[in-house]
Image: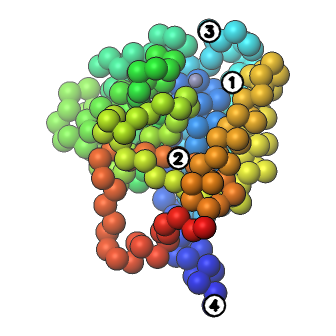
Amino acid sequence: MKSNDLVKRMLSANMNGKRILVFGAHPDDIEFGCGPFLIDAAEQGAHLEWNVLSRGEAGTQGDAKTREAEARAAAALANADIRFPETKGDTQIRADREMVLLAASAIRRFKPHYVLAPTGHLNQHPDHRETSLLVRDAFRLARYGKTPGLEDFEPHSSQLILFYEITSGATEDSGLTPFLLDVSGHIDKWTTLMNCHASQVANMDYVELQLAKARALGIQAGVGAALRLYSEGPLLLSSVNALSGLRGQRF
Ligand SMILES: [Zn+2]
């Protein structure tokens, strides 16, 4: 068996049946920010649920109905369940107690192994920043046994929270640890996923911007395209076996 096949089999065994809960502030954030990660995971047998905290109703392009329909089409393509929890809506997302409990309830209900949220750096849409903060807090409260307001669900401790970039600019002093995922094999499907958001891509080529960024990140690692994700603090390998799927730069 070729070593590549072996790595693929190991990854497949690792992701099969894993549950991934993804939060986004607006209907296209998830697809643009971490689409190829989710495509890869779903192909390996992971179960995906997307929680979108607004319908993008304050955006310049598209209305709430159109944008929800675009997101639902993208989710179907990615084999993900999608929910639009009731919130105050676009531009009004805040990491207040109500929203933290809403996200923590979703974590306790879905019981994910992995939780994904946007990066929380300052220089970007405030909804992205606030979503990052509220999910980060929810990730903790979901596992605290007697958190008031979460009595309806059993506590749940997820394995890992990861952050994805909607707008570049998360810096190394943010406390996040960057790592790259080789997404060269998922570019076509990712492109299709992003293009589901016709109302957003009509006036500016956001898709090409994401692809150009992925190609530039790929150059750093000697692959065709890469997606940058972040963990909070250092990533921990459970044993040396986890090294089998990792590699450094190859030129
Ligand atoms: Zn957004």
Asked if the residue at tag 3 contacts the one at tag 1, i.e. Cβ–Cβ closer than 8 Å, the answer is no
Question: Looking at the rendered structure, which numbered label has been put on residue 58?
Answer: 3
Relative placement, left or right, of 31 versus 48 is right
Per the model, the C-alpha gap separating discs 1 and 3 is 13 Å
Q: What element carries label 2?
A: strand
Asked if the residue at tag 4 contacts the one at tag 3, i.e. Cβ–Cβ closer than 8 Å, the answer is no
Per the model, the C-alpha gap separating discs 3 and 4 is 53 Å
Asked if the residue at tag 2 contacts the one at tag 3, i.e. Cβ–Cβ closer than 8 Å, the answer is no
Residue annotated with mark 1:
68
Q: What residue type is labelled 1?
A: Glu
Residue annotated with mark 4:
1
Identify the mark nearer the N-term, 3 or 2: 3
Identify the mark nearer the N-term, 1 or 4: 4
Per the model, the C-alpha gap separating discs 2 and 1 is 26 Å
Question: Which circle, 3 or 2, is nearer the viewer?
Answer: 2
* Residue drawn at x 64%, y 87% as measured from the top left: 2
Image x and y of residue 34, in percent: 58, 43
Question: Which circle, 1 or 3, is nearer the viewer?
Answer: 3
Question: Which circle, 2 or 1, is nearer the viewer?
Answer: 2
Mark 4 surroundings within 10 Å by alpha-carbon count, few (fewer than 14), some (14 through 19), many (20 or more): few
Label 1 beta carbon within 8 A of ligand 1: no
Quadrant of residue 30 within the rendered picture: top right
Question: Which circle, 1 or 4, is nearer the viewer?
Answer: 4
Residue annotated with mark 2:
228
Q: What residue type is labelled 3?
A: Ala
Q: Quadrant of the N terminus?
A: bottom right
Q: Which amino acid does label 2 sit on?
A: Arg
Identify the mark nearer the N-term, 1 or 3: 3
Relative placement, left or right, of 170 versus 137 is right
Quadrant of residue 56 within the rendered picture: top right
